[in-house]
């Protein structure tokens, strides 16, 4: 639905190095640059992420790390947050390609948080605690919780209270919370979409932000999967620094 806007270069000729208006940028773009994204692009992405979330959350361009799609973002976070044999907990059903994105090269595990149809697959604290305790009994170190919001494949929204519960659990147990928000702009007016970025600003401002990370992409909301534009947004300085390398 947005391809005609992208194709019409006449509106923004300065965006191309193949036009008289953009050729002045050729040398800067053709040579090595920041691997984590041009400063102007990171600033634009931070503003766009805030716009998609209705202006209810703000994003700092200096915390944006660009990657090769959300696939690259998830893999990078897996390498940054866990060692081989350690695990992320994932509510079921989950996006099956997470096994590839998170595990194939990093060597981490994905362990299910069992959710059920009788309550529309809502993620409950009881199910989370059961999965966490079950992993501990097996001697597996849990390093994080990975969710998609909106959900892939369910298409449901994680409500504010559940997000607050997850941020609280992460803080209390010193585990990371990775929220894949790749469909954040592909929602209806109701039920209300809430980002983890809004929740930690308004609902649980006391939570440990070093444990919160957001994955985003242009693949779904703008329909540009071939552009391979992925974003890691981390509140953790060490993760930002590591991901940039």
Image (cartoon, grey):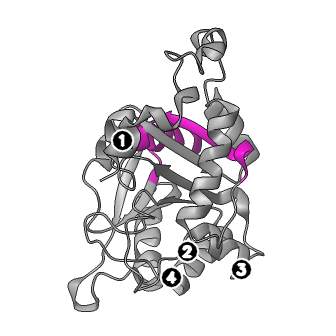
Say which residue label 2 marks.
166
Nearer-N-terminus badge (2/3): 2
Q: Which residue is disc 4 drawn over?
A: 162
Q: Do the residues labelled 2 and 3 touch (CB within 8 Å)?
A: no
Between the residue at mark 4 and the residue at mark 2, the CA separation in whole angstroms equals 6 Å
Give the residue number, with chain letter if any, for mark 3: 202
Crowding around mark 1 (Cα neighbors within 10 Å: few <14, some 14 to 19, many 20+) is: some
Compare marks 1 and 3 and give the one earlier in the sequence: 1
Residue 12 on image: x %, y %: 53, 35
Q: What stretch is highlighted in magenta?
A: 60-87
Pointer 4 with pointer 3, Cβ within 8 A? no
The answer to whether one can see residue 6 in this image is yes
Mark 1–mark 4 distance (CA, rounded to whole Å): 25 Å
The reply to whether discs 4 and 2 touch (Cβ–Cβ < 8 Å) is: yes
Please provide percent x and percent y for residue 85: 43, 43
Q: Which residue is drawn at 58% across and 71% down?
A: 54
Residue assigned mark 1: 101
Mark nearer the viewer, 1 or 3: 3
Front residue of 185 and 234:
185
Instruction: Indicate which disc, 2 or 1, sits on the residue closer to the N terminus.
Output: 1
Counting residues from the N terminus, which is met first, the one under dot 1 or under dot 4? Answer: 1
Q: Distance between the residues labelled 1 and 3?
A: 31 Å
Task: Decide which of tag 4 and tag 3 comes sooner along the chain.
Answer: 4
Above or below, comparing residue 232 to residue 32 in the picture: below
Q: Is residue 83 visible?
A: no
Dot 1 falls on a residue whose secondary structure is helix
**Residues packed near mark 2 inside 10 Å, few (<14), some (14 to 19) or many (20 plus):** many
Q: Nearer the viewer, residue 98 or 197?
A: 197
Report the Cα–Cα distance between label 2 and label 1: 22 Å
* Residue 113 sits above or below residue 190 on the image: above
Q: Is mark 3 on a helix, strand or loop?
A: helix
């Amino acid at each position: 639905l947005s391809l005609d806007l992208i194709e019409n270069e006449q509106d923004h000729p300065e965006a191309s190095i193949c036009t008289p208006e953009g050729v002045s940028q050729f040398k800067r773009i053709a040579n090595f640059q920041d691997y984590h994204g041009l400063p102007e692009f990171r600033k634009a992405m931070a503003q766009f992420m805030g716009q998609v979330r209705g202006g209810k959350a703000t994003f700092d361009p200096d915390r944006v790390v660009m990657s090769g799609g959300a696939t690259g973002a998830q893999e990078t976070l897996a390498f940054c947050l866990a060692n081989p044999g350690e695990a992320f907990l994932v509510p079921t059903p989950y996006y099956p390609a997470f096994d590839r994105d998170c595990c194939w090269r990093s060597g981490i595990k994905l362990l299910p948080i069992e959710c059920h149809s009788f309550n529309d697959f809502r993620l409950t604290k009881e199910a989370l605690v059961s999965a966490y305790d079950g992993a501990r009994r097996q001697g597996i170190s849990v390093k994080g919780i990975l969710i998609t919001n909106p959900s892939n494949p369910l298409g449901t929204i994680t409500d504010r209270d559940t997000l607050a519960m997850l941020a609280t659990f992460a803080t209390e147990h010193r585990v990371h919370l990775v929220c894949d928000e790749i469909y954040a702009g592909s929602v209806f007016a109701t039920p209300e979409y809430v980002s983890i970025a809004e929740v930690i600003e308004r609902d649980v401002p006391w939570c440990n932000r070093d444990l919160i990370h957001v994955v985003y992409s242009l693949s779904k909301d703008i329909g540009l999967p071939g552009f391979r534009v992925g974003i890691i947004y981390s509140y953790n300085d060490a993760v930002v620094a590591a991901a940039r390398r």
